[in-house]
Amino acid sequence: MRTVITGGAGFIGSHLCDYLIEKGHQIICIDSLLTGKVENISHLMGNDQFRFIKHNVSDYIYVDGRVDNVLHFASPASPSDYLEFPIQTLKVGSLGTLHSLGLAKAKKARFLLASTSEVYGDPQIHPQREDYWGHVNPVGPRGVYDEAKRFAEAMTMAYHRYHGVDTRIVRIFNTYGPRMRVKDGRALPNFMCQALRGEDITVFGSGLQTRSFCYASDLVDGIYRLLLSNEHDPVNIGNPEEITICQLAREILALTGSKSKIIFKPLPVDDPKIRQPDISRAKMLLGWEPRVSREEGLRKTLGYFKDTLTSCEKNV
């Protein structure tokens, strides 16, 4: 298999590169490095099965030779990123998806779109099923990401129905693990870095809002199973074990042994109050469910952040 991964130098994209190379794929990683990092893929640079192209997929994509799969993972994914890069986020969700689908169409390749639980917005049903249409503010600050992904799903289904492209859509819920950025902006890396530095743990809102955290290896396994399936409609991939943000902060404080205090700040506009995937379809269609416990996943992720912060301090 010869597989193109857009956003392949990002957190999830780089794990996909590793996983698919282990499965025997030749990988063409395309990334503009707006939020991706060369460090995530540097260990692959000498591998004959891996090729890196620095390119913005919001522009036309050219790849020579055969392509069997196109996995479109390019996009800022953290609120701090898409608030800093709102136009780029909209363009990669629209033009980037158009060009990635165009590549798949031209090469007669299978296409998989990385969508998100954010298409559900601040949901009015719980847990969230794939047949729920969402509750999204299109003109709010988070709308640039939410609506970009909703548009990308619509474009993907249009290419499937009109052009017969063999498409897949994965709706990714909160994911964590090694290669998350120190300044990612999301709760879990923020809490870990603050605890390790002895800084106050910043919780936005009451801390009673919920999230469901899936370890990266579980997510990648689910994505691979979806790629191999014949399912064209969206499929949730995430860990249905729901916790409050305050509970996550306390778990990280206990894990690190930090004396940091939890402080509270106002909740950002349109921040979802609840988030929990219904993974019934993933279980039924893919035989998939998460295997890594939160305790194990947090421990592995903490080790990564310890090493990363130590390396950063040495380089200062």
Image: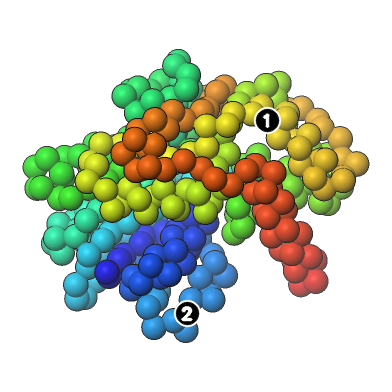
In the picture, measured across the screen, residue 286 lies left or right of residue 107, that is right
Picture coordinates of residue 110 (x, y %)? 22, 56
What residue sits 31% from the left and 43% below the top?
Answer: 169
What residue sits 30% from the left and 52% below the top?
Answer: 227
How is the rendered protein coloured?
Answer: rainbow
Q: Amino acid at mark 1?
A: Ile
Neighbourhood count class around disc 1 (C-alpha, 10 Å): few under 14, some 14–19, many 20 upward: many
Q: Secondary structure at mark 2?
A: loop
In the picture, measured across the screen, residue 132 lies left or right of residue 80, that is left
Mark-to-mark CA distance, 1 and 2: 38 Å
Picture coordinates of residue 179 (x, y %)? 59, 59
Seen from the viewer's position, the closer of residues 147 and 272 is 272
For label 1, the residue is 245
The image quadrant that residue 291 belongs to is top right
What residue sits 48% from the left and 55% below the top?
Answer: 12
Asked whether residue 187 appears in the rendered view, the answer is: yes
Q: Amino acid at mark 2?
A: Met
- Disc number placed over residue 45 in the picture, else none: 2
Q: Quadrant of the N terminus?
A: bottom left
Instruction: Tell me if residue 99 comes above or below residue 281 in the rendering.
Output: below
Picture coordinates of residue 162 (x, y %)? 9, 42
Q: Quadrant of the C terminus?
A: bottom right
